[in-house]
Image: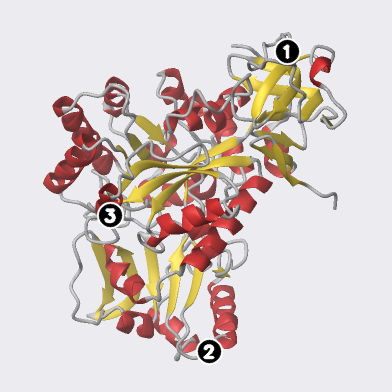
Amino acid sequence: MATSSAPSRAHTPIASHTTPIADIILHNGPIWRGFEEGTTQALALWQGRVLATGTLDELSPYKGDHTRIIDLEGRLATPGFTDAHLHPTYLGVVMDWVDITPQKAPTLEALLSAVKARVEQSAPGDWVFASGYDQTKLDVKRHPTLAELDAIAPNNPVMLIRTCTHVQIANSLAMKAGGIDDSTPDPDGGQIGKENGKLTGFLAENASAPVFDAVPPLSRDAAIDAIERAGNYCLSVGITSVMDAAIGMKAGFEEIAAYNEAKRTGRLPVRTWMALRATPAHDNIVPQCEAVGLVSGVGDDMLMVGSVKLFLDGSIGGATAWMTEGYLADKDNHGLQMIPTQELEAMVLEYHEKGYQICAHAIGDGAIEQLITAYEKALTAYPDPDRRHRVEHSGFLAPDHNERMQKAGIIPSPQQVFLYDFGDAYITMIGKERVYSSYPQKTWTDMGLKPPAGSDSPVCDPAPWTNLYAMLTRKTGAGTQLDPSECLSIEEALQSYTEYGAYSQKQEHVRGKLMPGYLADVAVFSRNLLEATPEEILNDTLCDLTILNGKVFYERKEG
């Protein structure tokens, strides 16, 4: 492995009949080109690509009157980060909702006060949404209730979205809009909370679909606004490429049009790899996409059709992740199976045969077993050793799952930030023993599974500091130490955010490194991460500058 002390070697520039003049040259700080390549002293960018690397003297022939020279002053530059799993449109929408995260609303009273303030600013009948609560971190240690929401919002439908996004709390008007009453049975793959036969407001997984269906759809203009808002935030934290992990979740097939219009009008800030939502009973946009030829790989470096996206279970914090062993509070509760096995295997086989890469939300070992088996059967029927199907989240595995993923070429796509943000809540739900070695990223890395990094934003903040800290330390927000043998080095963590992010999207020969010919996407951080402590990365690091396609799109202003 090349380290930060590896000698800098000049690399041949991309081909040109005359000596090209660089648009940007970065120097005077470690420039991390890739895990094997190590660091270099200077980097030249030209026409959206990396032109050359080496010393500043070696790159002097590419310097011209209009070349911008960026002095790193000892700061680290890396390839632009890839967030391999987040929901940009949803993130952009949530940024306008009421913030009820534990930081903003640590008590039930604070939560209800924040929602009430928004209700008072809204016209009667307007929907009010709030996002980010975690009942395990509230002072009352429970979910809010329908009655409590009715008391502050008698004239507005209200929905609270738990931080995991798999559980919602609705008031009476929201329930009525969705046609849900005391007699409504649980749908397949969903749960409607009731106490003594009366609605509590609790909705899990598919149970919330009728309520969301009653919400006025997101317009194309609003979707573009959300895409732009979220993308600009990503650029401000060093992220230049993302996977939208459920295209269609907010606006159905219209989101495809919104993304393309955003790109055409210069309002798509980050490279986007689209995962097409294929939930069987709700918002399956894959048939429409296939009908117009939108299959995996269609598009360009800025906007590409990536995979089909399925949801197989829920979350640990919401007690809806499908676990073969029950939850501590209710041993008979094993979470929710979202899709019957026979139906899932038929869907996976169909999409695999049609050429789609597939990714699926699977957190619990029950869901992961179901998914790996479906992938194995599809790959046996139609062999493709480089299809790179993915297991999104892949948190709690059975003993044989890693070896089976390795054999089948399946990629685990985790979010180590979950351990920091939710690890202590996980322990209260299923016990420390099961949480201790969950999300085993070092094992996956050593096995060559190439796990990328992701935030699942808006579930967690896409800013990479917490994710990096969790990769390096395996510590929760309360300081609980989880399996230290699964800690990564800083170079391995950077590899997850760069090379492995690109690999998960079949783009490893295009981006993820800073080598001649690769896309000129660069993040410059406020310190040298290669020498920083995990605590310095978590608490005192920012992104100073972000370059996309050879142009500076974000530059932090002091103060």
Task: In this rendered view, identify the residue nearer to me: 428 or 281.
Answer: 281
Would you say 318 lies left or right of 94 here?
Answer: left
Label 3: state its secondary structure.
helix
Say which amino acid is labelled 2.
Answer: Ala
Give the vertical position of 156 relative to 540 (above or below): below
Label 2: state its secondary structure.
loop
Residue 214 coordinates in the image, percent (x, y): 34, 77
Q: Residue 256 has which mark?
A: none
Q: Residues within 10 Å of mark 2 (few under 14, many from 20)?
A: few
Q: Residues within 10 Å of mark 3 (few under 14, many from 20)?
A: few
Residues under numbered marks 1 and 2 in contact, where contact means CB atoms less than 8 Å apart: no
Label 1 – label 2 distance at C-alpha: 61 Å
Q: Which residue is mark 1?
A: 5
Earlier-in-chain disc, 2 versus 3 = 2
Q: Which residue is mark 3?
A: 288
Say which amino acid is labelled 1.
Answer: Ser
Residue at point 23%, 82% (across, down): 182
Residue 362 in sight in this render: no
Q: Which residue is mark 2?
A: 123
Earlier-in-chain disc, 1 versus 3 = 1
Residues under numbered marks 2 and 3 in contact, where contact means CB atoms less than 8 Å apart: no
Task: In this rendered view, identify the residue nearer to me: 229 or 437.
Answer: 229
Say which amino acid is labelled 3.
Answer: Gln
